[in-house]
Image (cartoon, rainbow, N blue to C red):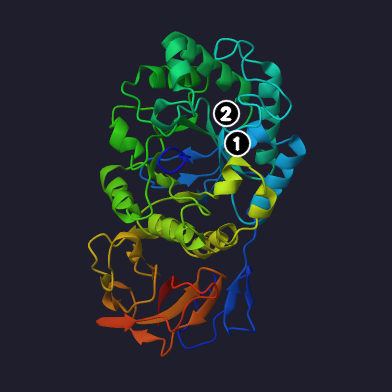
């Protein structure tokens, strides 16, 4: 949330390659392209929660045991700044666009109209800054918002006490230190009891800051765990920090890992998390759409690079939406919010949990490049399909022998509008190296494309 420098089956597999593919239920013929357009549709609104982490799985599963692909939106000031009616409008919009998670501050220190009070003039504490005096009227409103999210099948990644950039005035770290560990532990017990009836919470400890010592952090999470020993927890540190990288392996309460990146180092951070931790990890924060030249392309780049590098989800951010500043209602319709939904639809149309990142570049062998222009690939562990994300137009080389074959059908997926097109001359023999290159910019006038390769006979 850190302001810059301060805070801030598409095509189901045909039974035989060369026959007409079957259109999936959520795909529709696209007359303009002659291919298929992948529709963004909300997932189920009930039967999802609680989520859980299971040994040996690099992703979360829902209450029915189904994989849960995190498709999140940064909504830090949702509880503090919006009325109940506005919160409903926001949550309904995000669900329609395919989001199933929001990242939210339970108590807001800086970014609210009458900080730290909510829209109704209620402060979180009866005595300013005293965590031992929670104001039930404030937390009652928070309870309603979390419940409304649950009704819409939306996970709330809830920061109980956002520490703030550099431990400064944007967050609560100074007040936390003044309250001390015992009172923070009691506050942890309070919020856990107050919201235990909601099964759609992932607790987010920390907040844009790597505290110099862990006493306060551990006290807060210990209080939560005393009341709810099955809660899911993660840690949000400073930018370029992975949760496990900072905390190590000794914090047993950390069931869910994450990365917090720049736009130019997502792949390296994701591959590091995938290699060093067996926990599910996701992109909790990157660069936000609508600030410092970052746009929908940035949002897509960060998301695809994370998911194809081993992540189990991602959180996008829009500069106006996260703080619900003037014009946030219009900003809900940003290009990034519209186009990022196609990522979820693409992955959920395939067995995405089988994907293994091509860390050694034995599948994607040429045209990789570096920094924010880095192409990235992942291959299903049974060789049934592979995905390659190209941030810009270039020729890439793929080792088709890595797929199960014996033939490979290739499709170009436009991440900006959800259209899927057959690649020229497809299918190909599943042997040797083959070069692919998009013919033009995507529908948004930008150069990013996804190459889908599927095995068949």
Residue 45 shows in this picture: no
Find residue 50 and name its label: none
- Residue 163's place in the image compared with 420, above or below, is above
What count of labels does the image hold? 2
Residue nearest the observer in this picture, 59 or 110: 110
The residue under label 1 is 77
**Is residue 388 placed above or below 410 in the rendered structure?**
above
Where 359 sits versus 217, above or below?
Answer: below
Q: Is residue 287 left or right of residue 89?
A: left
Residue bearing the label numbered 2: 108
How far from the left and from the top, in percent, is residue 171?
49, 27
> Which badge, 1 or 2, comes first in the chain's sequence?
1
Whole-percent x and y of residue 295? 50, 59
Tell me the quarter of the picture where residue 151 sits: top right
What residue do we see at 73% from left, 41% from top? 86
Q: Quadrant of residue 205?
A: top left
Res. 389 visible in picture: yes
Please report the residue visible at 61 percent of the width from the left and 44 percent of the height from the top.
154
Q: Where is residue 294 in the image (x, y as percent from the top left)?
A: 47, 56
Point out the image quarter for the C terminus.
bottom left
424 lies above or below 60 = below
Secondary structure beneath dot 1 equals: loop
Q: Dot 1 surroundings within 10 Å: few (below 14), some, or many (20 or more)?
A: many
């Amino acid at each position: 949330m850190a302001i810059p420098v301060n805070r801030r089956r598409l095509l189901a597999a045909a039974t035989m390659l060369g026959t007409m593919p079957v259109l999936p239920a959520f795909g529709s013929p696209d007359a303009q392209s002659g291919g298929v357009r992948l529709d963004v549709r909300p997932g189920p609104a009930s039967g999802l929660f609680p989520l859980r982490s299971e040994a040996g799985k690099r992703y979360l599963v829902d209450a029915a045991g189904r994989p849960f692909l995190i498709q999140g939106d940064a909504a830090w000031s949702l509880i503090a700044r919006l009325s109940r009616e506005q919160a409903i409008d926001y949550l309904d919009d995000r669900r329609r666009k395919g989001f199933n998670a929001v990242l939210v501050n339970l108590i807001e220190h800086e970014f609210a109209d009458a900080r730290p009070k909510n829209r109704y003039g209620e402060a979180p504490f009866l005595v300013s800054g005293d965590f031992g005096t929670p104001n039930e009227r404030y937390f009652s409103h928070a309870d309603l918002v979390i419940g409304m999210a649950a009704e819409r099948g939306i996970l709330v990644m809830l920061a109980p006490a956002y520490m703030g950039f550099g431990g400064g005035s944007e967050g609560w770290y100074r007040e936390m230190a003044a309250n001390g560990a015992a009172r923070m532990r009691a506050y942890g017990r309070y919020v856990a009891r107050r919201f235990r009836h909601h099964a759609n919470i992932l607790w987010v400890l920390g907040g844009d800051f790597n505290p110099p010592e862990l006493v306060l952090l551990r006290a807060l999470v210990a209080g939560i765990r005393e009341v709810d020993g099955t809660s899911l927890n993660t840690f949000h540190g400073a930018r370029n920090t992975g949760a496990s990288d900072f905390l190590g392996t000794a914090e047993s309460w950390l069931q869910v890992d994450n990365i917090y990146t720049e736009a130019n180092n997502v792949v390296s951070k994701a591959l590091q998390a995938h290699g060093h931790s067996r926990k599910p990890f996701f992109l909790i924060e990157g660069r936000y759409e609508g600030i410092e030249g970052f746009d929908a392309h940035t949002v897509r780049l960060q998301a695809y690079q994370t998911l194809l590098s081993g992540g189990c989800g991602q959180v996008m951010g829009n500069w106006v939406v996260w703080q619900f500043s003037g014009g946030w209602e219009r900003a809900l319709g940003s290009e990034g919010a519209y186009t990022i939904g196609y990522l979820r639809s693409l992955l959920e149309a395939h067995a995405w949990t089988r994907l293994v990142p091509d860390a050694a570049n034995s599948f994607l062998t040429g045209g990789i490049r570096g920094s924010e222009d880095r192409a990235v690939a992942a291959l299903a562990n049974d060789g049934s399909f592979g995905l390659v994300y190209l941030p810009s137009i270039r020729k890439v080389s793929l080792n088709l022998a890595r797929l199960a074959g014996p033939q490979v059908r290739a499709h170009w997926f436009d991440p900006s509008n959800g259209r899927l097109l057959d690649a020229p001359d497809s299918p190909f023999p599943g042997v040797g190296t083959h070069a692919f290159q998009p013919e033009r910019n995507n529908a948004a006038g930008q150069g990013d494309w996804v190459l889908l390769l599927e095995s068949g006979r």
